[in-house]
Image: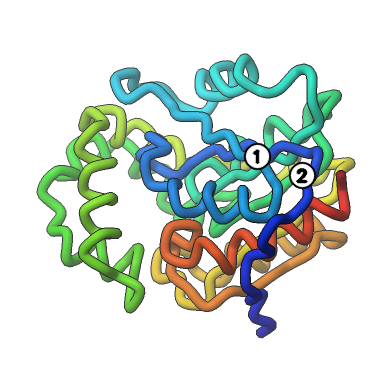
Amino acid sequence: MPEGEGAPRQGAQRVHARLVVLPGLDATGTQHGAFTAAMQRHGIDTTVIAYPVDRAVGYDVLADIVQAALPRDEDYVLLGESFSGPLALRLAAAHPARLRGLVLSTTFARSPWYAWRRLQSLLYWAPVRTLPMGALSWLLLGRWSSAALREALRAALSRVQTDVLRTRAVAALGVDVGACAAALRIPALCLLAVDDRLLPSRCQRHLSALLPAQDTVWLEGPHLLLQARPDAAAEAIAMFVATVS
């Protein structure tokens, strides 16, 4: 699998498409500092749209929140990370005027556990606050785990109310935006982690079937790819942004 490595370019010229990031499950945006700094070194300004930490809402309401925050006066590339991939696909399928490209990072169009969607209600009783950090670190960070990354993950999750996390998990369990993916009319990049322990490989096979013209970049890294491998991810994304700006 090709590894999209490369040192960040120093003194890079401004690339005119802004990168707009829809973050993963906690959606606080607090775990993206190193990644946004890496994008800036490529001349790309980045906006991370945080979701409410105290409103237990699913994809429909989140779509309205994000829609209101999207740029109106400049071109942009939309990045959907993990939980937010289906949301990014849904928004991109509506063909916003200034949207130039779509990046899907360690995500899915249909729930990896779609067959279990009838068990969604059980997630409302899931002990999301009692999951040990060691288990979360193994699942989301793998061998890239560090004290700093674990603390950032813990702090981000602690900011979000328990019922909010549960509601988002329920939404992800039952989501299927395959029709939205089929309606895309813009270039897309799928950014995948070789050592993703959360998402099964069938997620990528499904995305590939829906987006046959996509660019795909595999990077050594865990599910939290933007956090664990910010420079490598930024390199791959910057190359894509340059082609659509």
In the picture, which quadrant includes the C terminus?
top right
Disc on the earlier residue, 2 or 1: 2
- Which residue lies at the image location 24% right of the left edge and 59% below the top edge? 150
Is residue 169 visible from the viewing direction of this image? no
Q: How many marks?
A: 2
Query: Left of 224 or right of it: where is 142?
Result: left
Disc ID at residue 206: none
Residue 128, quarter of picture? top left
Query: Residue visible at 37% across and 40% down?
Result: 30
**Position above or below: 56 against 214:** above
**Which quadrant of the figure contains the N terminus?**
bottom right
- Amino acid type, callout 1: Asp
Q: Position of residue 6 (x, y in %)?
A: 65, 75
Is residue 238 or residue 116 the one in the foreground?
A: 238
Secondary structure of the residue carrying tag 2 is: loop
Here the colouring is rainbow
x, y percent for residue 21? 58, 40
Residue 141: image x %, image y %? 34, 67
The residue indicated by pointer 2 is 14
- Binning the other alpha carbons within 10 Å of mark 1 as few (below 14), some (14 to 19) or many (20 upward) gives some
Describe residue 31's horizontal placement relative to residue 129 as left or right: right
Q: Hey, which quadrant is residue 140 in on the image?
A: bottom left
Asked whether residue 46 is in view, the answer is: yes
